[in-house]
Image (cartoon, grey):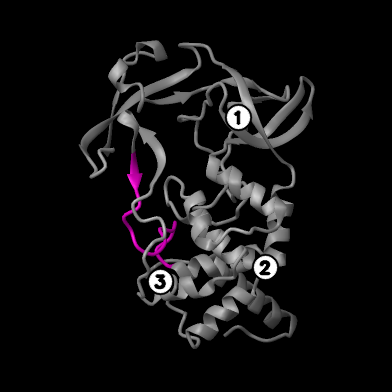
């Protein structure tokens, strides 16, 4: 367990509140920019629809006019909406952001805010959202907020507790999520178990059976269908597991993780970026070296 990593995450998330949406308000058609229906080209083994990236526009800006068969997957781009929560705080589209677990692994709002542009951002009545409450001329407001999944809510609560009695395998089952299904579990494997070995083995091609093999996860599609775990190792937001470790060792003030990587690979961990890629951890180390050389009056050439 890394006390430094836990303390860093606790600091990052200390102001987050998790609340329930009471209602959202948007004018139609004035607040609807467009409505698009993605094209289904097939289905996965589980029966989950597969889209090809093409979308057809609906010639309406009223959600009630969306064909019944397409409502579950319609992508609505909102110009504006606002709503109220169970604690009396209001929120609006301008404050919608996502925590970054995919791009730069900031575990926070992200270097660029990760704003989603209004697509599918309007939460439903009764849905949980999380954000930071601030005072405004109109009362309490969530100045930044996102729709919180049960898995991320569990992770936030776990970090705030600062400990867990669950095993890595049990936590894998509780943290499977959409997109890259193991990204939250991978974070926990480092923070609570210092399990660098798993990332090194994946880097070296040593396959390990996934503890959630066959378990459904993520969004529920029509007919109650969901994706199931069929992959081995961890499904991460970047192809190189050591890059995941290197970035988080810097983000979460836990350099011992990267030192352990170098020990386990006997220093042969330079190839953790990929052709033409980059690593924020490497960039931080390069800048630190440049600063040291400048302060020492040494040339970088």
| Viewer-nearest residue: 247 or 158 | 158
Q: Earlier in the sequence, mark 2 or mark 1?
A: 2
SS label for mark 1: helix
Q: Position of residue 288 (x, y in %)?
A: 66, 75
Location of the N terminus by quadrant is bottom right
Could you tell me how far apart the alpha carbons at marks 3 and 1 are, in whole angstroms?
40 Å
Say the numbered circle drawn on residue 94: 1
227 drawn magenta: yes
Q: Earlier in the sequence, mark 3 or mark 1?
A: 1
Is 17 left or right of 151, judged from the image as shown?
right
Q: Which residue is drawn at 58% across and 33% down?
A: 96
Residue receiving disc 3: 202
Which region is colored magenta? Answer: 226-240
- Near mark 1 (Cα within 10 A), the count class, few <14, some 14-19 or many ≥20, is some
Residue 223 disc label: none
Residue 104 left/right relative to 139: left
Residue placed under numbered mark 2 in the picture = 2
**Disc 2 to disc 3: CB gap under 8 Å:** no
Q: Residue at x 64, y 85 (%)?
A: 299
The relative height of residue 176 versus residue 256 in the rendered view (above or below) is above
Which secondary structure dominates the residues rendered in magenta? loop
Marks counted in the figure total: 3
Q: The residue tagged with tag 2: helix, strand or loop? A: loop
Q: In which quarter of the image is the C terminus?
A: bottom right
Residue 155 location (% of width, % of height): 60, 50
Element type at mark 3: helix
Q: Distance between the residues labelled 2 and 3?
A: 21 Å
**Where is residue 222 drawn, in percent x and y?**
32, 29
């Amino acid at each position: 367990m890394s006390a430094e990593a836990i303390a860093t995450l606790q600091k990052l998330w200390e102001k987050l509140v998790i609340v329930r949406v009471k209602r959202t308000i948007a004018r139609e058609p004035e607040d609807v920019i467009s409505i698009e229906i993605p094209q289904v080209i097939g289905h996965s083994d589980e029966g989950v629809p597969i889209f090809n990236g093409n979308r057809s526009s609906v010639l309406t800006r009223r959600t009630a006019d969306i064909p019944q068969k397409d409502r579950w997957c319609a992508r609505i781009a909102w110009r504006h909406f606002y709503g109220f929560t169970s604690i009396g705080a209001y929120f609006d589209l301008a404050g919608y952001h996502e925590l970054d677990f995919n791009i730069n692994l900031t575990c926070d709002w992200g270097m660029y805010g990760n704003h989603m542009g209004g697509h599918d951002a309007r939460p439903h009545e009764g849905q949980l959202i999380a954000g930071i409450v601030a005072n405004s001329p109109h009362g309490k407001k969530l100045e930044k907020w996102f729709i919180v999944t049960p898995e991320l809510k569990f992770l936030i609560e776990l970090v705030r507790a600062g400990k867990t009695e669950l095993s890595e395998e049990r936590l894998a089952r509780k943290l499977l999520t959409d997109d890259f299904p193991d990204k939250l579990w991978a974070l926990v494997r480092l923070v609570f178990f210092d399990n660098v070995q798993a990332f090194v083995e994946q880097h070296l091609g040593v396959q390990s059976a996934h503890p959630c093999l066959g378990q459904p996860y993520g969004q529920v599609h029509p007919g109650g269908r969901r994706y199931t775990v069929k992959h081995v190792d961890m499904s991460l937001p970047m192809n190189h597991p050591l890059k995941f470790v290197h970035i988080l060792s810097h983000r979460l003030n836990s350099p011992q993780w990267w030192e352990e990587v170098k020990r386990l690979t006997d220093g042969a961990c330079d190839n953790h970026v990929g052709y033409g890629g980059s690593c924020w951890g490497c960039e931080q180390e390069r800048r630190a070296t440049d600063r040291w050389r400048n302060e020492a009056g040494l040339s970088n050439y």
